[in-house]
Amino acid sequence: MKTSTLRIVPLPTEVAEEARRAVQSGAEDHTVIMVDSATGYPCRHCLRWAQPGERVILFPYASIPAGHPYSETGPIFVHAEPCERYDATREYPAEFRNGRVFRAYNANYNMIDAEVANGSKLEAVIEKLFQNPDTTFVDARSVTRGCFTFRIQRA
Ligand SMILES: [Zn+2]
């Protein structure tokens, strides 16, 4: 990744905190899960895999807001306990170098490209998506389950 031109955008802290409050108040679409696998529950706030024994909140998140043809709300996890928002925003998150698809969107939230990339090929694919001047942001998602993981924007 051209670290000078792109940045990683983790889930906003306000969204993670709102999910934690919603669980406390018994929101039906928020649930707490005890993690039982080291690579099954990516926290979208600290951008790490939640570890067995930790608890995560599962809830729906509108990665593409309502009112657009590509509007999308889907399930994500955050740690149930407060965690530190990923702050190495010039570096691709080390724990998610495999199993992601990268979807490019324009300023109107229309998907204009998408590509699967893994390992050492990641940065080149992401840079290629941003070489299109219409690309406003790129969303990383799980290639298997389709869930939103994090966003990449021009710095
Ligand atoms: Zn976390």
Image (tube, rainbow, N blue to C red):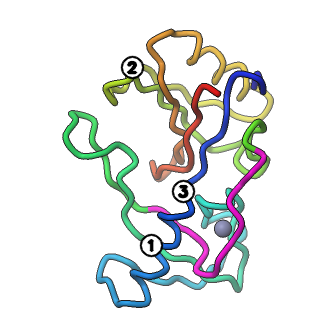
Q: Residue at horizontal 34%, vertical 90%?
A: 26
**Amino acid type of the residue tagged 1 in the rendering:** Glu
Q: Residue at horizontal 62%, vertical 65%?
A: 40
Mark 2 Cβ inside 8 Å of ligand 1: no
Q: Which residue is mark 3?
A: 12
**Amino acid type of the residue tagged 2 in the rendering:** Ile
Q: Residue at horizontal 49%, vertical 79%?
A: 20
Mark 1 Cβ inside 8 Å of ligand 1: no
Quadrant showing the N terminus:
top right
Query: Which comes sooner in the sequence, label 2 or label 3?
Result: 3
Residue 59, placed above or below residue 112: below
Estimate how packed mark 3 is, as few (under 14), some (14 to 19) or many (20 or more) residues with alpha carbons within 10 Å. Answer: few
Residue 117 placed where, x, y %? 64, 30
Foreground: disc 2 or disc 1: 1
Labels 2 & 3 near each other (Cβ < 8 A): no
Q: Which residue is mark 2?
A: 112
Return the residue nearer the eye: 125 or 8.
8
Assign a secondary structure to mark 1: helix
Residue 77 placed where, x, y %? 52, 67
Q: Which residue is mark 1?
A: 18
Query: Which comes sooner in the sequence, label 2 or label 1?
Result: 1
The magenta segment? 76-88
Labels 1 & 3 near each other (Cβ < 8 A): no
**Amino acid type of the residue tagged 3 in the rendering:** Pro
Residue 106 placed where, x, y %? 39, 22
Q: CA distance from mark 2 to mark 3?
A: 25 Å
Residue 136, placed above or below residue 87: above
